[in-house]
Amino acid sequence: MAVARLGYLGLSSTDPAAWGPFGTDLLGLMSVPGEGEGVFLKMDDHPFRLMVEKGEEDKLACTGWEVDDAAVYEETVAALESSGATVTPGDRAGAAKRCVTEYCVSEDPAGNPIEIYHGRTDVGGAFESPQGVSRFITGNMGLGHVVVPAPNQDETHAFYKDVLGFGDSDDLSLPPPAEGAPDMRIVFLHAANPRHHSLALFNFPVPSGIVHLMFEVSTVDEVGACMDRVTKAGVPLMATLGRHCNDNMLSFYAVGPGGIAVEYGCDGLQLDWDTFEPTTSTIADIWGHEYQAVEV
């Protein structure tokens, strides 16, 4: 039993309309209608991958983790319940909004919201990027990855491995952000697909509940073109162009509406987990990725 991929993300936003032009004009995603109010953004043949709805805060609302079929879904629900997690079945209206056959709502030990589902519906529609992006790297690897806070990192790490079937990719430790603070540590986890990581756990609290989300395109030229659009629009960068050590991703980080960071990159590693040995790292980047504090 294992989670297969990150299927969709939901965000709560004080200004969901701002995600429309940010997603389409800058990132090259396609805006599509969805159930209820909100902004729904499409990046492949799935009905949408990102939904942004009105809320009192700018924060992560849900991570939609896909399993392959109804049998695995039932096994996963049972594993969640056995772990002591509260599991709430989704209703028909919620399933219709998410375009899934069945889903449930829970949370990890750090309080991050998770949803487990199977049977994505309305798959097969054409994707046409308003900015000419040829394709996003999705398919059986899902939409990309998400990094969430987990101050109780060891407990949360064990939950994703033992309950949801994730595997280790890399364990990165970096110098503390301030004197007297603990080291920064990011644990990278892969789902049952070749993407280096679909999830990472950061050992500091983050008010929005999300450190960043990542979209991957197929060429460095598309990364560069997006960075040009972002800088021309005056959108601040959280990190300049650079290449990560552990997953080889060449990317930059833009600050989206409400301060939600988006990594946009290419060249991410795809791995064979039968032969891969998890790594331990103390260096984040081969070059670049100069991080900067940004006021939102």
Image: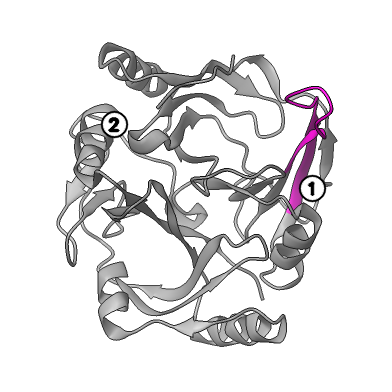
- Image position, residue 212 (x, y; %): 51, 39
Instruction: Give the residue displayed 75% in from the left and 23% down from the top.
Output: 178
Mark 2: amino acid? Val
Q: Is residue 59 left or right of residue 145?
A: left
Does the magenta portion include 173?
Answer: yes
Q: Which mark is residue 276?
A: 1
Q: Position of residue 31 (x, y in %)?
A: 19, 46
Tell me which label, 2 or 1, sits earlier in the chain: 2
Q: Could you tell me which secondary element the residue under label 1 belongs to?
A: loop
| SS class, disc 2 | loop
Q: Which residues are magenta?
A: 168-186
In the rendered view, would you say 173 is above or below 251? below
Q: Which quadrant: the C terminus? A: top left
When asked about the image quadrant of residue 259, the answer is top left
Left or right of residue 246, residue 101 in this image = left
Residue 107 x %, y %:
57, 68
Q: Which residue has dot 2 on it?
A: 133
